[in-house]
Amino acid sequence: MEEYLEYMKTLRSQMNDVEDQAAKISVEEQMQITIIQNIEKDLQLAKSEAKQLIEDIDQRIKEKGQICTQILGNQGKISTLESDSSTLCQKKNVSHMAFEFCNKIITIFYNLILHLKARTEFRTIICIATLTLELIQQERVNLSTKLSEKSAYYAKLADDLNTKLQKQQDFKSSTLFEYSFSPVREWLWPTLVWQDFNGQGHNRRENWRFSGNCGSENCLNADNLDNDEKEVMKNLDAAHAKFDLVTQLKSKLVSDNSKAKQSIELVRRRINGFKSQLKEMDRRTLEEELTALLSDKAGESEYLQSLHQQIDKLKGISHILKCACGKEYEVEVDLGSK
């Protein structure tokens, strides 16, 4: 009987140990839930950072659109200056025609004077012709002065146009280089600039070719403009290629964001099934508990196996007791119903 009681005490102590172990496992599960909650917070932080990145990309796209608008406005101003230059060149040609007309009038009066030398009214005609010639000479001087002023103005205008064109090309190159790798969302301005250039570049180039007799110092250099346009076309081709690359990168980023959102949604659904106590635990504590749980997993398996062996031994325990009346009773441990 004493042995039976000792076995029962041992069994009770072992059952208490099992209950303690179960309580520890429950605590460890709660700690794991807390770890998962911290992971969810990290995922939310990553989502907010991705949203901020998208907003930054939108801001870059808006800034890029504004720069494109400024570029188109500057191109319109250059086109207006080109038109004004063409008009001034035409006026200069008209002035040349007036100058030639004056020379013809002078030649006619000179021939008239030679023809009237033999006549009696020679002096009167000479006076009239002299006055006329003086007026024509004055007009010729005035026209020459105006032509000189206009030539200087045309030269200055040509230099200004060349300077503005160079600045515009430098601005385009720097702008394209700065914004070519911006992730950037649907950017259409390189295509717009390309179409505007292809549609108007030829007409603008023709406007630079002046007609008439003008010196090299007073006319624009069309060859230099052609070279500049080729350089701009080359830069625009490179910018278009970079734009395609940015579009591909943007598509990839959108796909990655979609996958991340799906993963976050899956983790969120799993976390919603956890207890609130586990969600409130610290991340570091959960990590430590998870490490300890993984390290103790093998030991717990061995312990449970030994516990099952001890239970099997307890099932085989039996003892014979004699009653005062002379009867014998066999006492066994029956754990089958529990």
Image: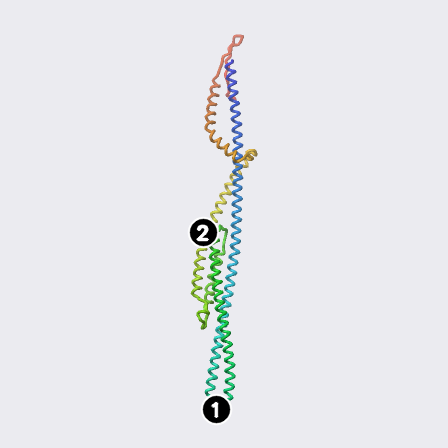
Image position of 187 with respect to 207: above or below: above
**Dots 2 and 1: beta carbons under 8 Å?**
no
- Residue 230 lies left or right of residue 270; in this view the side is left
In the rendered image, which quarter is residue 213 located in?
bottom left
Q: Secondary structure at mark 1?
A: loop
Q: Give x and y (percent) for residue 76.
A: 51, 62
Q: Give x and y (percent) for residue 117.
A: 47, 89
Question: In the rendered structure, which disc, 2 or 1, sits on the residue that comes first in sequence?
Answer: 1
Q: Give x and y (percent) for residue 190.
A: 48, 56
Residue shown at 51% from the left, 82% from the top: 134
Disc nearest the viewer among 2 and 1: 1
At label 1, which amino acid type do we have? Arg
Image position of 44 with respect to 150: above or below: above
Q: Residue furthest right?
A: 276
Residue on which disc 2 sits = 245
Image position of 294 with respect to 154: above or below: above
Residue shown at 49% from the left, 56% from the top: 189
Residue shown at 50% from the left, 87% from the top: 126
Q: Secondary structure at mark 2?
A: helix
Q: Give x and y (percent) for residue 53.
A: 51, 47
Q: Nearer the viewer, residue 31 or 267?
A: 31
Residue on which disc 1 sits = 119
Badge 2: residue crowd in 10 Å (few <14, some 14–19, many ≥20): some
Q: Residue furthest top?
A: 325
Image position of 200 with respect to 95: above or below: above
Residue shown at 46% from the left, 22% from the top: 309
Give the number of the disc on residue 60: none
Q: How is the image coloured?
A: rainbow
- Residue 216 lies left or right of residue 23; in this view the side is left
At label 2, which amino acid type do we have? Leu
